[in-house]
Image (cartoon, grey):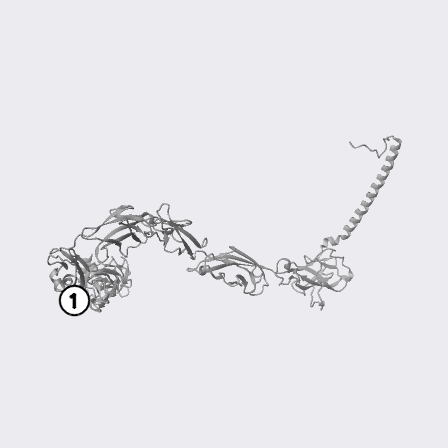
Amino acid sequence: MNWIILRLVLLLASAGQIHSRAALRFTTLEEQEAGVKIGSLSTTYSAPYQLLNERYIKVDKSTGDLFTKERIDRETLCPSHQDGDCTFIDTAVVSLNSEIVKLIIVVDDINDNAPIFERNEIPLHIPEDASIGTAFPLDDQAQDKDTGNNGLIHYHLKDSGGFFAIRQDGHELELVVLRELDRETQENHILVLVAVDGGSVPLSATANLSVTVTDVDDNCPEFDTDSPVTAIVPALGIKGSAVAQLKATDKDLGQNAQITFSFSRQISDRAKALFHLDEHTGLISLAVDIQVDSPEEHMLKVLANSPLCPPVQTQVAIYIQPVTSPEPSIRIRFVTEHKNQVIVLQENEPPTVLALLELEDTSAAKGTLSLDEDSMPFSLKPQAGSYLLSTSKPLDFEMCREYNVTLIISDPHGTRLHRREVIKVAVEDVNDNAPKFEQTHYEKDIKENNEPGEFLLKVQATDADSYQFGKVRYRLTNRGPFRIHEETGVISVAESLDREQQETYILTVLAWDGGEPSQEGFATVSIHILDLNDNPPAFSTPHFYFFVSESIPQLSQVGKVTVSDADKGGNGLIVDVRILSENVPFAMDLAQGSLRSTGEVDREKQDRYDLLVVAVDGGSPALSTTVKMTIFIEDVNDNQPQVLLPSSNLSCLTISPATREGSMITKIYAIDEDSGMNSDITYQIIATKPALHSPFQIDQQSGNITLVQHLRGEDYGMHHLFVVVRDGGKPDPLQTTVWINLLVNETLEKCHVNAVPDYLPPRLPPPMPVKDCRCESKAWLIFYCGLCLMVISVCVLLAVVVVFIKCKKRKRKVEKKTVWETGNLCELKPLN
């Protein structure tokens, strides 16, 4: 098909029917889904539409809309156009004239490629004497395949410790020294070099920057602290024998750390002849064989030399012992326990004899035995030519575990020291010390709602005893929700704590040692539970009910609203109580904890209000609770009765003189918008015109007006009844008045009233008690019935009395005659 179109195009071109027009340019973002619209040919050309090459885009032949055909990766499409537009060209055949249109599709970049370092670790060597501000170029830079800001990379360092910084100038990247370097302190610095591109959602990459600080000769030799300062050469010293080994170090490396030793020129010629110093190893040895009759002391000054450094000096005192004749010796006879010539004594023993010392004199020398001045707390007493070595007071293992008792053998005059002898005394520990805590009272705060097993604190107790006696273990005497590790003293929380249940715990920690019996020590731990805002405000009831009068003044209290919070401090502070419902005449008084009225209420408009009230505490984040509140509006007598019938004081009704007595003539109908007793309406006629006895009467409850007597000739004409309509309000009822106009006439033509009588009573009478008309109309009948019943009762009572008296008389006659008469009407029979 494409070949056919191409041939058609060539044919039209040869015919000169193709008009050259400017190319159309469209833009799309890379990596979009297939089917995304990128533009339309219909804005410039008419249908139909056809593309010669549908590699990346396709066209709707009817509408001319261009759509992507697949995902387009800009970096794959234009790998060599990183800094310019990435385009591809297509050709469209449009309209019925088959015009050829060149299409240029520009693929814009998105930030879909993160920076990439070629190496994960970049090595760099910097001399330790590099001055602050020195910059070292970094050639290993990150690459980003995106263009524009998406491919623009910025760098920064992490974990530099303040020693280095990155400086970026265009495409140049340098590492700048910010602090002095010291190889001897830190030889290697591992930095993290972060590369971040400039996309709207930036992407980043990291590489480790390994900086090695190279050595320079900036350190001089120093003699070690363990180099000898004294040495003893025994009698009959042999040439080449080692006397002392000197040690010196240089913190530098390689050639910078080489040290040579030499004698100072200030030593004596005698010392130079007797001793030899190895310049490389620092070993002092005998240069000749030595045999002297008297002791000699030589002070050697030794120098340690290193390139570019002044020499350092140390002194070694060397004592040469003379050849002597045999001297007196000591023979030890142990009294107490001993091991390997060491006396063993338990601590806290009273003064005890340790050994019997015998001084064995030689033929050439005599001597005496004494203790060195520092040999305390021991004593030496002569005993029959020997000496008793004793303790002068109890020994304390915790103060000193081993003593070196120095015995001095001298001539009888004490002028010459023959020799010294040392006897070792080891003190054996007993369990005489209880564990002691570092502090007797610990305090710790912990937030409530903790995770079970959370670390709380560590207590530490030490025991001055040794071995098993000094091994301390721990336990809690009142552990509650806490646990302690028996060996480490770590106290942890076994369960989640609730401050509202208990705010403070006092724990007693017992520490005991491994003795038999063991010694114990105690410490207390006060644990304070810190409050979290985990309790919302709580109202005293989930639903409040209030009753208020509709006449309640503004700002009056409707009722108390009690709300509390079990939390503490700001978490338990109620900072706000408000009504969520809008446009209601009520508001919360937070200071007084009450609901107040803020506007007028009218029961006749709304007899109840259903509100939602929220309480908010002062925690962060704050918690809140919502409750319902229903307010019932109680009625007051604020509405007077309204007469609906008759509709006017000028209304008139014609009555036939033949109307029968007891007939209802008309009715007054009135309403009251109040409720209860306030809406109970009664009716009363307080004036009539003409003022003679009116043949009409009104029912106080129903308002029905009836004819109570037969109409006579003098009743003909207009009758005006002045009626008061009252409600049942207490203490002051409200009332209204109405004129009832009745015309007694033979003809029942419609009557007219032009004006009501000019009558206003000076004061309306009080309401009459409510009567039942039916009972009133037949009161006379009830009266006569009652009177008749009373008369009949009296007559019956009199008849009974008369009969009873006659019976009593006849009974007496019978008892006298002792004769029973069968015809006697008052015959008596005994009761069985």
Left or right, 27 with respect to 665, comes to left
- Judge by depth and name the residue closer to the eye, 666 or 354: 354
Q: Residue at x 41, y 51 (%)?
A: 508
Point out residue 431 in the picture as x, y percentages from the top left corner: 35, 48
- Judge by depth and name the residue closer to the eye, 535 or 720: 535
Above or below, 677 against 813 in this view is below
Circle 1 is placed at which residue position?
A: 309
| Quadrant where the image shows the C terminus | top right
Q: Residue at x 77, y 63 (%)?
A: 692
On the question of residue 139 being in view, the answer is no
Residue type, mark 1 in image: Cys
Left or right, 704 with respect to 362, comes to right
The number of callouts visible is: 1
Point out residue 329 in the picture as x, y percentages from the top left corner: 21, 50
Instruction: Check disc 1: other Cα within 10 Å, few if <14, some if 14-19, many if 20+.
Output: few
Point out residue 65 in the picture as x, y percentages from the top left corner: 28, 61
- Judge by depth and name the residue closer to the eye, 652 or 704: 704
Hey, which quadrant is residue 817 in on the image? top right
Hey, which quadrant is residue 638 in on the image? bottom right
Left or right, 710 with respect to 354, comes to right
Badge 1 marks a residue whose secondary structure is strand
- Judge by depth and name the residue closer to the eye, 113 or 251: 251
On the question of residue 804 being in view, the answer is yes
Above or below, 398 against 182 in this view is above
